[in-house]
Amino acid sequence: SQQVLNFETTLNQLRTLMSGTNLTEYLGKSIAVLVFGSNDYINNYLMPSIYSSSFNYSPPDFANLLLNHYARQLLTLYSLGLRKFLLAGIGPLGCIPNQRASGQAPPDRCVDYVNQILGTFNEGLRSLVDQLNKHPGAIFVYGNTYGAVGDILNNPANYGFSVVDRGCCGIGRNQGQITCLPFAVPCTNRNIYVFWDAFHPTQAVNAILAQRAFTGQPRDCYPINVQQMTLIS
C-alpha cells in the first residue's frame, strides 16, 4: 500500500512536467509489472518462530488475504490511470536454496509442501485477472512464473543449466543458509546456475522468464502475452 502511495507522489511530480492529456495517454500506454507475494511467504508465513501468520491462517486463507489486499491496490493503480498490467505469479519457493537448506526435504528434493501451499495464490491471481479485465480499457495478464521456473528445474539441460539446487553466491548448506554478503566470492560461471543467491534466480533465468512473458503461449502468459498487450492501443 505504501508503494501505491509512492506512485501517487510520483504522478503528482509528473503532472508538473506534462499536461493532463499527455499524462493520461502516457499512463494508458505504460505497462505496470507487479511481482508480489514471494516475500509474504519467505519472510513471514514460512517463519513461524518469528511470525504468527501460519498459526492464524490456513494456506488458502493466507493466500486469499494477500489477494484481497492486492486487488484493492491494483484497483487504486487502475483508478490513477494505469491500464496495462503484468501480474507475475509466485515461483516454486520450495525449490529455492533457502528452503532446500532448511533440511525439511532430502538433499536432492524441493520442499514439496511449500510449493503446494502456493497453489491457491497463483490460481486466485489468474482468476483475479479475469475479474479485473471487466473494467473498461483494462488489460491485466497473469505471468505463470511457477510453470516456467518448474520447467527449467525439471529440464535444466534444455536451457543450458547444470546447477539447480544451490546459489551461485551464498554460505552454508546449498549456499542458501546465509545469502550473498559483501566481499563474498560468487561462482565463476553464473550462467549454468538457476539461482543467484538463497532466494533469487540468476539473470539467465530472468531472461527466459521475460521472453516467455513477452512472446509465450497462454500457459506462460494469460490471456495474452506482453507483446500482444503492447499492440493494443
Image (cartoon, helix red, strand yellow):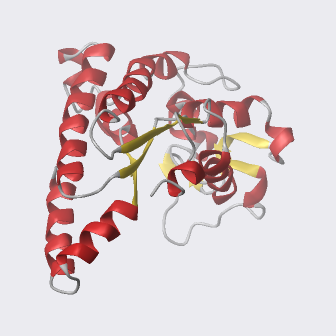
Question: Which residue is painted at 50% across and 46% down in the image?
Answer: 199
- The x and y percentages for residue 201 are 59, 49
- The x and y percentages for residue 23 are 25, 73
Tell me if I can see residue 4 in this picture.
yes
- The x and y percentages for residue 147 are 61, 30
Q: Quadrant of the C terminus?
A: bottom left
Instruction: Give residue 36's quadrant in the image.
Output: top left
Question: Which residue is painted at 66% across and 63% down in the image?
Answer: 186
Left or right position of 202 against 128: right
Tell me if I can see residue 30 in this picture.
no
Number of marks in picture: 0
Vertical comparison of 225 with 9: above or below: above
Front-most of residues 158 and 68: 68
Front-most of residues 131 and 44: 131
Vertical comparison of 172 with 104: above or below: below
Query: For the view shown, which residue lies furthest in the bottom direction?
Result: 17
- The x and y percentages for residue 220 are 61, 35
Left or right position of 157 against 21: right
Question: Which residue is painted at 40% across and 39% down in the image?
Answer: 38
Instruction: Give residue 3's quadrant in the image.
Output: bottom left
